[in-house]
Image: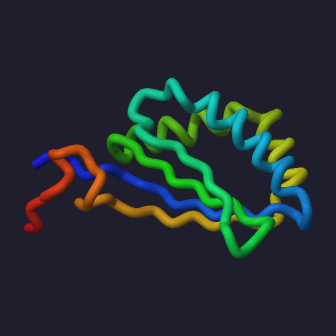
Amino acid sequence: MSTPTKTLFVRLVAKPGQRDQLAAVLNEIIRECETEPGTREYKMSFEDDNADAIRFYESYDDWSAFEAHKVHRDTMTDLNRRMDQFRLSEELTHTTFMGGFGLPQEKRAVELQ
């Protein structure tokens, strides 16, 4: 059995009317993270029912890849400071992907022990 993918769901709420400015900074962060070893997906979307909310879906090969990502993100001090200008709140939910549609074949059926 392969190691399950580590995933993170993030919900960011921009200060009123500043979602697009926050998204612009987040797009720069996405570009910075594209070449991180072990970072599989880093996707941003806007909530349909809240004009100030942004959702992120992130997936990593394993916990150590996520930890490396966090270290890399900590070095982006200018981008982090700019993001703080527009961000009102942030919620993080850590999960382990165990299977489902749209996953690579080895993730589709994980044996539960």
- Front-lying residue, 28 or 80: 28
Q: Is residue 103 left or right of residue 78?
A: left
Residue at horizontal 90 percent and vertical 51 percent from the top: 85
Residue at horizontal 38 percent and vertical 40 percent from the top: 64
x and y percent of residue 101 in the render?
Answer: 26, 58
Number of numbered discs:
0
x and y percent of residue 35 in the render?
Answer: 51, 24
Q: Which residue sits furthest front?
A: 48
- Front-lying residue, 84 or 52: 52
x and y percent of residue 24 in the render?
Answer: 79, 41
Q: Is residue 2 left or right of residue 53?
A: left
Q: Is residue 57 left or right of residue 1?
A: right
29 above or below 52?
above
x and y percent of residue 9 in the render?
Answer: 52, 61
Which colour style is shown?
rainbow
100 above or below 59?
below
95 above or below 76?
below
Q: Which residue sits furthest top?
A: 35
Asked which quadrant contains residue 70, the reply is top right
Residue at horizontal 68 percent and vertical 31 percent from the top: 75
Residue at horizontal 87 percent and vertical 54 percent from the top: 86
The quadrant the C terminus occupies is bottom left
